[in-house]
Amino acid sequence: MPEMLICKKERGYSCLFLAIVNIVEMHSYLLLCGPSEVSLAQSAFPDAPLVDKASKDSEAILMDLGSRVSRKKDFIPAVTASIKKGWVQPSSTSGMKRVMSEAFDVEDAGTLDVDPNDPYGRIQRSNSIIVKKRPSEKLQPMQVEA
């Protein structure tokens, strides 16, 4: 989640979505990192429920997109149609909670570097006062009721 917020701020995006698509089960979720994303996603996919926060430590919200799995057929047309119909980004006085992306300077984000000691060439963020390193933890599968 912090990386989404940093990317959004670094690139000057108004909205940034991350679609998580399970191609085996033909099911997807949309990770929403702020009030603009929630507003646009609810406009584009009015029948898709907001599941909950992505994790207890996160401000990110998951939207259950159901069987929508195609960027070309399902995601882009719906978002584009909402914008063309007049969707407006929520203002800071809209009552929705603002997120971390508005509370830091891009310089505080540090840099993305390839780990030279990692045989897979993983990328990590260095010298960031925003992204805190967590001790390694085993990921647990998320349980979502259908």
Image (cartoon, grey):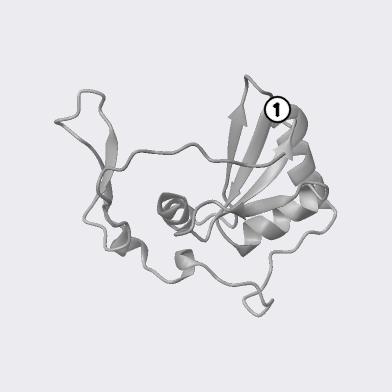
Task: Answer with left or right where residue 96 lies relative to residue 134.
Answer: right
> Which residue is identified by label 1?
70
Residue farthest along the top direction in this orientation: 24
Residue farthest along the bottom direction in this orientation: 93
Tell me the quarter of the picture where residue 115 sits: top left
Which amino acid, mark 1?
Ser
Instruction: Tell me where residue 123 appears, x and y as whole percent.
Output: 29, 37
Residue pictured at 78% horizontal, 37% vertical: 77
Residue pictured at 63% horizontal, 43% vertical: 30
Task: Answer with left or right where residue 126 lies relative to residue 20.
Answer: left
Instruction: Tell me where residue 15 appears, x and y as whole percent.
Output: 60, 54
Task: Answer with left or right where residue 116 lies relative to residue 134.
Answer: left
Instruction: Quarter of the image for the C terminus: give it.
Output: top right
How many numbered discs, if any?
1
Tell me the quarter of the picture where residue 79 sits: top right
User: Residue 78 versus residue 61: which sits nearer the camera?
Assistant: 61
57 lies above or below 114 = below
Residue pictured at 48% horizontal, 69% vertical: 102
Instruction: Tell me where residue 17 appears, x and y as whole percent.
Output: 59, 46
Q: Secondary structure at mark 1?
A: loop
User: Residue 64 versus residue 145: which sits nearer the camera?
Assistant: 145
Count residues near mark 1 (Cα–Cα under 10 Å), then give few for <14, some for 14-19, many for 20+: few
Tell me the quarter of the picture where residue 72 sits: top right
Task: Answer with left or right where residue 145 lies relative to residue 9.
Answer: right
Residue farthest along the right direction in this orientation: 85
Instruction: Tell me where residue 111 appears, x and y as whole percent.
Output: 27, 50
